[in-house]
Image: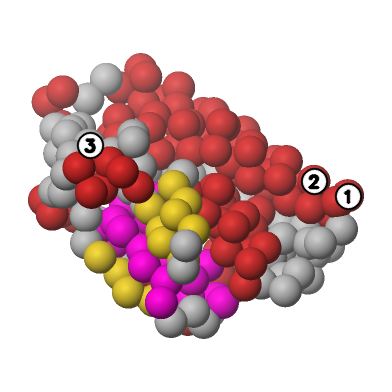
Amino acid sequence: MLKVWGRRSSFNVQKVMWLVGELGLAHEHIDAGGDFGGLDAPAYLAMNPHGRVPVIQDGDATVWESHAILRYLAARHGAGRFWSDDPAARARVDGWMDWSQTALQPDFLIGVFWGFFRTPEDERNWPVIRSALARCVVDFEKLERLLEGRSFLLGEELSLADITAGTSLYRYFELEIDRPHLPLVERWYRTLRQRAAYREHVMIPFDELRGRLLDR
C-alpha cells in the first residue's frame, strides 16, 4: 500500500494528498513533521536525506519533493490523466508546475502567508508583506488570463498545473488580506471546491499556524 509521510496542514503535503484523493489510491498517511517530529530519525533520513515532508513509499519506490511525487504518482497511476503521455502537452503542465513552485509559492506562501499569518503581529514587516501581496496580484492576473475560455488552467480537465497552483487558493481566499476581483480565478476556485479530494485534503483549517514562525 502507498504510504505518505507528513502533517496534514503542510502546504506541500496537501498537494500530494489532493492527487492521491483524485486517483482514489488506497494509502496509509503517517503524521510527521511539526509537532509530530520524526524528521531527524535515521529511518526517515534514509528515505529523505533533507529531512522534509512529504515523502512517499510505493512498493519499492521512495520519492521525496512534492512535485517529484506528483509526477511520479500521475505517471504510475494516472494513465495519462493529470500529466499527459504526450511530451508537448506534458511540457506545458511542467512549465506551470515550475512557475507555481518558483514564483507563486514564494510570493504567496513565503511572502504573504509566512510574512503575515505565521509572523506574530508585532513582528510583521509590512513593507515586505505589501510587496509580496503586489507580486501575488501579478501572479493571479496571469492565471486570470490563462483561464479565459477554459474550466481549468490548461483546458477542460484537471491537471498537475491546477494542483500545484490551486492548493494556494484556500489560504489565499481565507486570509484577511486585500484581494483584487478576478472573476475567472474565483470561478476556478469554486470549481475546485466542488471536488471531494480538494475539500478533504486542501480545505483544512490552518489556525494552528497563526504566529508560529518555526517551520512545521
Residue type for callout 2: Ala
28 with respect to 160 (left or right): left
Q: CA distance from mark 1 to mark 3?
A: 37 Å
Circle 1 is placed at which residue position? 88
Q: Could you tell which of marks 1 and 3 lies nearer the N-terminus?
A: 1
Q: Residues within 10 Å of mark 1 (few under 14, many from 20)?
A: few
User: Residue 148 occupies which quadrant of the picture?
Assistant: bottom right
The reply to whether callout 1 and callout 3 are in contact (CB within 8 Å) is: no
Residue located beneath label 2 in the image: 91
* CB within 8 Å, label 2 to label 1: yes
- Residue 8, magenta (yes or no): yes
- In the image, the segment drawn in magenta is 1-23
In this image, 87 relative to 158: left or right? right
- Whether residue 170 is visible to the viewer of this picture, yes or no, is no
> SS at mark 2?
helix
User: Element under label 3?
Assistant: loop
Quadrant of the rendering where the C terminus is positioned: top left
Mark seen at residue 119: none
Q: Is residue 60 above or below residue 67?
A: below
Question: Given the image, on which type of amino acid does mark 1 rest?
Answer: Ala
x and y, in percent, of residue 150 in the image: 79, 64
Q: Residue at x 46, y 68 (%)?
A: 59
| 6 drawn magenta | yes
Tell me if residue 199 comes above or below residue 83 in the rendering: below
Say which residue label 3 marks: 215
Question: Where does residue 81 sit, x and y in percent of width and height?
Answer: 72, 71
Choose between 57 and 134: the one closer to the eye.
Answer: 57
Q: Quadrant of residue 132?
A: top left
94 lies left or right of 37 = right
